[in-house]
Amino acid sequence: MVKVGVIGAGGRMGVAVCNAINNDSELELVAGIDPARAGSEIELNNASVTLSHKAELSALVEAGADVAVDFTHLEVALTNAEYCAANGIHMVIGTSGFKDDEIAKLDSLFNSSNCVVVPNFSISAVLLKHLSKIAAPFFETAEVIELHHDGKKDAPSGTAIDLATAIDEAGSDWAQDPTEVEILPSSRGAKVGSVPIHAVRMRGMVGHQEVIMGEVGQTLTLRQDSYDRSSFMPGVVLACKKVGSSEGVSLGLESFLGLE
């Protein structure tokens, strides 16, 4: 049985993660960290389990957590990572936006335990990236459209940046953008290498990624859609189970799914 603590347990995503862990026979939810909700109960589907939010990370050690799942934001996640690494706790980070030097810092921290940083826990998003990398060498142009709910604060999403980076690196001979005049600034999107990203923020959406690749006389469109936060839970559960047997710092779920 893998004992899991959730950091950021009070938000909607955190509650969903707590329930997913609580409902899996191989995982045990032992701690929920959320300073803003300390003392209040975590809302679990299983009414026989009650767990109070804690304010301090020390609750992870007190509860004997093997793994900590972090759904906070970048700056906080890095601080949390230092604590978990120092206390031999494996870490699953669902925060995006890490730069190369920050990943390098994580590498230096996790010596006695492991860490996985996952831009997107949706299995369909992982497969979209995998299939896009396979297709990229056969096309000369590619663009990414990412669509999210209107409550998302950042643009483009970490998932879209990761996806566009993978496509750009997998391609062999990208055509130059023929645009010479942008009538409206940024109308061609934000580029990662030769791959533009277009960000849509709209009510009614959750998280969606679309890749369009073009060659003379033909296009290929690949798309994944997450309609509910439940779409991320199988990936979270998988990461909690696999992180203990991985080495050091891993990026994404690919290796856990046998795609690398």
Image (tube, rainbow, N blue to C red):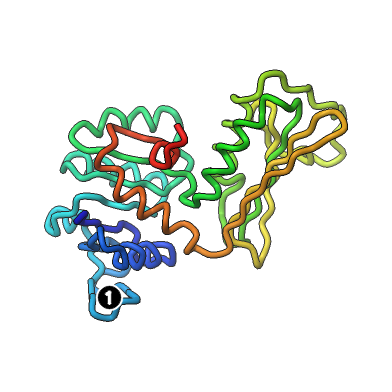
- Residue beneath the point at 78% across and 22% down: 176
Residue 184, relative to residue 103: is it above or below? below
User: Left or right: where does residue 226 sit relative to residue 212?
Assistant: left
- Residue beneath the point at 19% across and 50% down: 66
Q: Nearer the viewer, residue 84 or 184?
A: 84
Few, some or many C-alpha atoms within 10 Å of disc 1 (few <14, some 14-19, many ≥20)?
some
Give the x, y percent position of residue 162: 54, 37
Q: The N terminus appears in which quarter of the rendering?
A: bottom left
User: Left or right: where does residue 107 sit relative to residue 1?
Assistant: right
Residue 1, relative to residue 22: is it above or below? above
Instruction: Give the amino acid at mark 1.
Output: Glu
Looking at the image, which residue sits at the far front?
A: 258
Q: Nearer the viewer, residue 9 or 114?
A: 114
Give the x, y percent position of residue 185: 78, 39
Q: The C terminus appears in which quarter of the rendering?
A: top left
- Residue beneath the point at 27% across and 75% down: 40
Figure disc tally = 1
Q: In which image quadrant can residue 20 be found?
A: bottom left
Q: Nearer the viewer, residue 100 or 162?
A: 162
Q: Which residue is mark 1?
A: 41
Residue 48, relative to residue 238: is it above or below? below
- Residue beneath the point at 36% across and 50% down: 238
Give the x, y percent position of residue 130: 55, 37
Q: In which image quadrant can residue 258 be found?
A: top left
